[in-house]
Amino acid sequence: MGLTSQGSCTPLAQPFCDAASRAPPRPQDSWKTIARIGKAARLPFPIHPHMLRHSTGYKLANDGHDTRALQHYMGHKNIMHTVRYTDMAPDRFKNFWKD
C-alpha cells in the first residue's frame, strides 16, 4: 500500500512517513497529518482519518454507484450501514423512472 517490500515508504505514502528515518507511518502520524491538513484548510471542525472513509462512501453514493456494490467496496456486512450514504443523495433517484 504505502510501503516497499523493504519496509520503506513509497512516493504515495511520503506525507505520512518519518522524513529522517524513512520509517513506515504509524497510526498517530496519520492522525496528526490529517488534523494538520484540516487546520490548514481552515475547516470549522477537527478532522480525523475515519472521516475519509465516510467521505468516500458519500462521494460514491452521490455519483450514483449501486448500493450493493458500495456495500461490498466499503466492507459492510449489513446493508443498513451502507444505506446511510444514499440518504444524503436524494437526487440520485430524480430521473430513476422515465415516462
Image (spheres, rainbow, N blue to C red):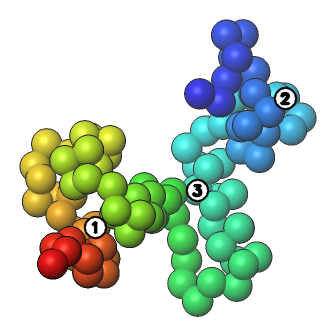
**Residue 36 seen in render:** yes
First in sequence: mark 1 vs mark 3: 3
Left or right: 61, with 13 as reference point: left
Using the rendered view, name the quadrant where residue 89 is placed. bottom left
User: Which residue, given by chain and number where applicable, does mark 2 sit on?
Assistant: 21
Q: Position of residue 81 (x, y in %)?
A: 17, 58
Using the rendered view, name the quadrant where residue 60 is placed. bottom left
In the foreground, 49 or 65: 65
What is the CA distance from the residue labelled 2 to the residue labelled 3?
A: 19 Å
Residue type of the residue flagged with mark 1: Tyr
| Residue 8, numbered circle | none
Q: Position of residue 32 (x, y in %)?
A: 65, 59
| Residue 31, numbered circle | 3
Point 28% across, 67% down: residue: 85
In the foreground, 99 or 23: 99
Using the rendered view, name the quadrant where residue 88 is placed. bottom left
Point 49% across, 59% down: residue: 52
Q: Position of residue 78 (x, y in %)?
A: 10, 49
Residue type of the residue flagged with mark 3: Trp
Label 1 element class:
helix
> Alpha-carbon neighbours of circle 1 within 10 Å: few (<14), some, or many (≥20)?
many
| Quadrant into which the C terminus falls | bottom left
| Quadrant into which the N terminus falls | top right
Residue type of the residue flagged with mark 2: Ser
> Alpha-carbon neighbours of circle 2 within 10 Å: few (<14), some, or many (≥20)?
few
User: Which residue, given by chain and number where applicable, does mark 1 sit on?
Assistant: 85
What is the CA distance from the residue labelled 1 to the residue labelled 3?
A: 23 Å
Q: Position of residue 16 (x, y in %)?
A: 71, 44
**Residue 17 seen in render:** no
Point 26% across, 53% down: residue: 66
Comparing labels 1 and 3, the label whose residue is closer to the camera: 1
